[in-house]
Image (cartoon, helix red, strand yellow):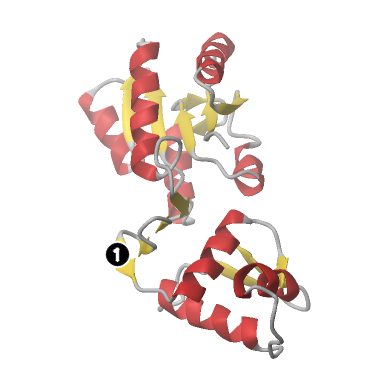
Amino acid sequence: MEALIVVVEDEEDILELIEYNLSKEGFDTIGLLSTKTLRQVLEEEKVDLMIMDRNLPGAEGSEYVAALRDEGINVPVIYLSAKDSDRDIEEGFLRGGDDYMTKPFNMKELLLRIKAMLRRTGGKGAEGVVTYRDIRLDLASRKVTVGGAPVVLTKLEFDLLYTLIKNSHIVLDRDYLLEHVWGGDEVYQDRTVNVAINRLKEKIDPDKSKVYIKTVRGVGYTLC
């Protein structure tokens, strides 16, 4: 599956140009003329990267990104903006940007920056790496970092976290988890999944400040 890139740009001709070139490179794209439906997209899709203008109708792009960061939403962002002073660029990075390009821009350079960003953050070009918010799983080495800090997980805990991330925003019931994580070929006690989930929570969110995993009473578990 190719990386999904959301482009938020209020000039329709620029938006269409970026979407066209991203599609030619094989990326999945969603183009938006404002931030009006952006939150819904972020909730429903696994977005790998956002290209964000700053002068948007009803919102200033960097202020919107800063609010997302405060909520723990860490989708990588490249600003593409006519705001080109040193102060503007610094402000963009301070408000959660990962890269910054000024208009007018060179499309080839934008594509190169996008590919470099995805390699660094686990999108296309970083095979065997899975990310969710500030959690990063390296499938080859089975190493896990949370907020850049290493976290030691057992094989079962790693597989459990990977399964949850692969199915982010989907509620997984205990039977599904037993079949796909434990193998489903043995008889387990009812509390097997609960205990493992609680151990995983303690390791990836020891102070309970980030709340990655939500329990849906009577149904199962999902990432949030």
Residue 218 higher or lower than 140, as above or below: below
- In what quadrant of the picture does the N terminus appear? top right
Q: Residue at x 46, y 52 (%)?
A: 131
Residue 188: image x %, image y %? Answer: 68, 87
Q: Residue at x 45, y 41 (%)?
A: 65
Residue 8 higher or lower than 192, as above or below: above
- Total marks placed: 1
Residue 210 higher or lower than 102, as above or below: below
* Along the viewing direction, whichever of 108 and 15 lies nearer the viewer: 108
Identify the amino acid type marked 1: Ala
* Residue placed under numbered mark 1 in the picture: 149
Residue 199: image x %, image y %? Answer: 49, 82
Q: As drawn, which residue projects farthest toward the right?
A: 218
Residue 39: image x %, image y %? Answer: 61, 43
* Along the viewing direction, whichever of 143 and 36 lies nearer the viewer: 143
Q: Quadrant of residue 86?
A: top left
